Image (cartoon, rainbow, N blue to C red):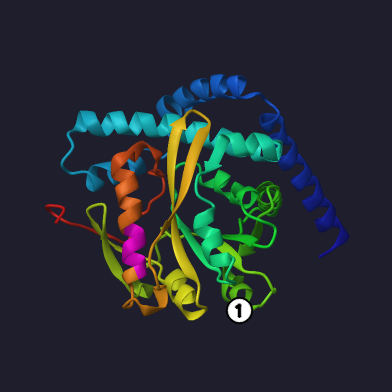
Amino acid sequence: MSEGKKAKGSVGTAVAAGCVKAVALLPFPVLYAISDVLYYIVYYVARYRRKVARRNLVSSFPEKNIDDIKRIERKFYRFFVDMVLESAKLMTMSREEMKRHMVFVNPEALTRFTDRGISVSAYLGHFGNWEWISSAALWAPESIEMAQIYHKLKSKAMDEVILHMRERMGQKCVEMRDTVRFMAHDSGRPRVIGFIADQSPKRHVAKYFIHFLNHEVPVLTGTEKATKHYGYQAVFIAVRRLRRGYYQAEFVPLADDPASLPDFELTDRYFAHLETEIREHPELYLWTHNRFKYAKTTDNGD
């Protein structure tokens, strides 16, 4: 890379970091006052991805009438703006403050495995404030290596900012293409690796479809394959939003022995847990993503 490109990249990163930090320095009451205003702009003026969100909600909940759909939609956009601004707070929150806002109620569900040298795959979805899940490292002993798999952003500046934010609480970010290499390398410490596993592969490369939110969806199965191959245990991270800016997370075991399960059973169990969460609090799921682009809807939800 030329010196000019390096300098340009450094400036871009500095500007992006400065913008995020400016938001992150705001106290929560001011942040939420801004969020209340931005909600109206995002939802009513810019109408950000409203068609996608509406289509996803209608096809996922055919049993609901349009008034119910609109109510969920509005609650989702209110939460979505909150979540984006909350995520920026990762830039400045102290570890003590973070532990007050995102509480992991049962870290012993991990240490019961890691104390015996067994690593763990932690499944989660785009539900609740998934960015704050990176604070799980604050609840784990130093003997555990905490990591999360992520997709590298196209913008180098924003990618560097997001990496800095996600790693501030002690969790290492591993690019998706390096997942197998990372899991295969023996660091001498048991690992807990977070996988946001509800992303959809293209239909022509999909190896497995499941019934999820009234759709037949192609799903990624690499997490299951790697978990079983490398002898990891598997947990689901269940998230609850207690109130604005406060969350609770719980590690829920997905299997006693993942390696003994039939093919795709672990993936089925993950999506079953995720769907239960979404049906209980649909406003906390990321509906603006075109998640069902390669899916088939079912007529009656069976």
Q: How many marks?
A: 1
Furthest-left residue in this view: 300
| Quadrant location of the C terminus in the rendered image | bottom left
Q: Is residue 82 above or below residue 131?
A: above
- Please report the residue visible at 50 percent of the width from the left and 44 percent of the height from the top: 105
Label 1: element kind: helix
Q: What amino acid is found at the position of numbered circle 1 in the picture? A: Ala
Task: Give left or right: position of 194 versus 54.
Answer: right
| Quadrant location of the N terminus in the rendered image | bottom right
* Frontmost residue, 233 versus 265: 233
- Please report the residue visible at 64 percent of the width from the left and 48 percent of the height from the top: 138
- Expressed as whole percent of the image width and height from the top left, the position of residue 115 reads 59, 66
Residue wearing tag 1: 184
Say if residue 300 shows up in the picture.
Answer: yes
Please give the range of residues in magenta. Answer: 266-271
Q: Is residue 247 above or below residue 12?
A: above
